Image (tube, rainbow, N blue to C red):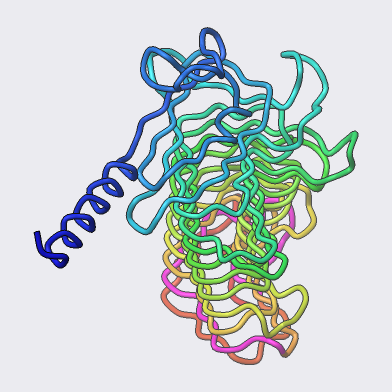
């Protein structure tokens, strides 16, 4: 046989070996009847999250946790998927979602801060978990890596108080050091944040998150906000429902190119939805607040509007329904830093329930477009005008 055909045969054999080696595998984990010395396959599951964390997973692999089982550990994967070929962590069997708990007993104190630590991995999906008694349900943090394409969906997330460690708590916490987080999706989850005191959130993006989607989630009352987005960009916050928060249902600050659409918020102590500049009046722009339903904002009697645009530019509140706010339905405050904002086609009903004020209140606004809003009066008050 000539040397060239022999080389081709060797290369072909190597390619076949590589294809076999990277074929996707489904692994199984059961705390109740698995063993870490098992193969991790159907009928021979692993037992602990520690064993899963040591696994060298490959793109396309799936790790399934037995429904009804409980783990008092942190899931911390050590492998990334690939573009279009994610690693998926989910559930198998029947019954309640598999539980990852931050306490050593059902009623004991929190001893682990994190349910799932993404560990700078990319192209990963987490779904169908019950994350409870933790300070961070899912922690997304990047020291230096370019982390992208991470999804949390169809999960229940219950977070605890900041004490005894003194750190904030959030169902999802996301931030960066010098790296980046992009293409982050938080979808169809049920969040139960710690309900009293500041520093407790449902979803808290601190900085460096781009191209994100937060949609179709339900939130119980949070001590601070259901959703806070800070120093992030190019995102969609859509069709979420929450209320009764210590501050706001949705708080977007020092961020740009964000759409807030179709959300339901009610009975918040401060605003239902607020978009504002905090560190600088030039950092918040191109934010659209549209088609949301806001009820009974500002129940604490301070910061008492349904929707507020504060120190923002080139942003809009349009086609929202705002009713029953303690103060104004919509409040805009520029203080010389805003401009190019629009308030249009909003339905404002019965606002000013606790303080006589205008349905659309303006403060230090030099340039704004206001048109085609429908203003209905508060009980026993005249329809409020624009000031």
Image location of residue 312, percent across then percent down: 64, 79
In which quarter of the view is residue 351 placed? Answer: bottom right
Image location of residue 178, percent across then percent down: 69, 70
Image location of residue 33, percent across then percent down: 51, 8
* Residue 347 magenta-highlighted: yes
Task: Name the residue nearer the viewer: 326 or 10.
Answer: 10
Q: Residue at x 65, y 27 (%)?
A: 132
Above or below — where is 287 with respect to 60? below
Above or below — where is 311 with respect to 211? below
Image location of residue 385, percent across then percent down: 58, 73
In this picture, which residue range is highlighted in magenta? Answer: 337-361
Task: Name the residue nearer the viewer: 171 or 330.
Answer: 171
What quarter of the picture does the C terminus occupy? bottom right
What quarter of the picture does the N terminus occupy? bottom left
* 127 left or right of 179 in image: left
Q: Residue at x 78, y 48 (%)?
A: 300
Furthest residue toward top: 33
């Amino acid at each position: 046989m000539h040397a060239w055909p022999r080389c081709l045969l060797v290369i072909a054999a190597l390619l076949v070996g590589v294809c076999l080696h990277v074929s996707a595998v489904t692994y199984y984990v059961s705390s109740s009847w698995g063993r870490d010395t098992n193969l991790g396959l159907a009928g021979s599951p692993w037992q602990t999250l520690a064993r899963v964390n040591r696994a060298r997973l490959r793109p396309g692999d799936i790790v399934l946790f037995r429904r009804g089982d409980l783990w008092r550990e942190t899931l911390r994967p050590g492998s990334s998927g690939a573009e279009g070929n994610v690693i998926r962590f989910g559930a198998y069997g029947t019954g309640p979602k598999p539980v990852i708990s931050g306490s050593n007993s059902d009623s004991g104190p929190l001893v682990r801060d994190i349910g799932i630590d993404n560990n700078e991995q990319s192209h990963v999906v987490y779904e169908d978990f019950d994350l409870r008694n933790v300070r961070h349900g899912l922690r997304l943090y990047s020291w230096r890596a370019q982390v992208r394409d991470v999804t949390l969906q169809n999960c229940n997330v219950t977070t605890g108080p900041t004490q005894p460690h003194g750190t904030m708590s959030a169902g999802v916490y996301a931030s960066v050091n010098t790296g980046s987080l992009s293409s982050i999706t938080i979808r169809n989850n049920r969040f139960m944040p710690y309900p009293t005191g500041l520093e407790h959130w449902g979803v808290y993006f601190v900085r460096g998150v781009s191209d994100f989607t937060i949609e179709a989630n339900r939130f119980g009352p949070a001590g601070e906000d259901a959703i806070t987005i800070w120093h992030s960009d190019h995102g969609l916050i859509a069709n979420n429902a929450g209320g009764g928060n210590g501050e706001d249902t949705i708080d977007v600050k020092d961020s740009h190119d964000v759409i807030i659409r179709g959300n339901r918020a009610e009975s918040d102590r401060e605003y239902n939805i607020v978009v504002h500049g905090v560190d600088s009046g030039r950092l918040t722009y191109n934010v659209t607040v549209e088609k949301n339903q806001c009820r009974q904002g500002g129940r604490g009697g301070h910061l008492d509007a349904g929707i507020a645009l504060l120190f923002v530019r080139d942003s809009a509140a349009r086609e929202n329904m705002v009713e029953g706010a303690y103060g104004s339905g919509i409040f805009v405050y520029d203080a010389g830093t805003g401009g190019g904002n629009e308030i249009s086609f909003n339905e404002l009903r019965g606002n000013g329930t606790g303080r006589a004020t205008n349905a659309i209140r303006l403060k230090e606004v030099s340039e704004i477009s206001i048109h085609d809003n429908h203003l209905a009066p508060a009980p026993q008050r005249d329809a409020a005008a624009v000031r």
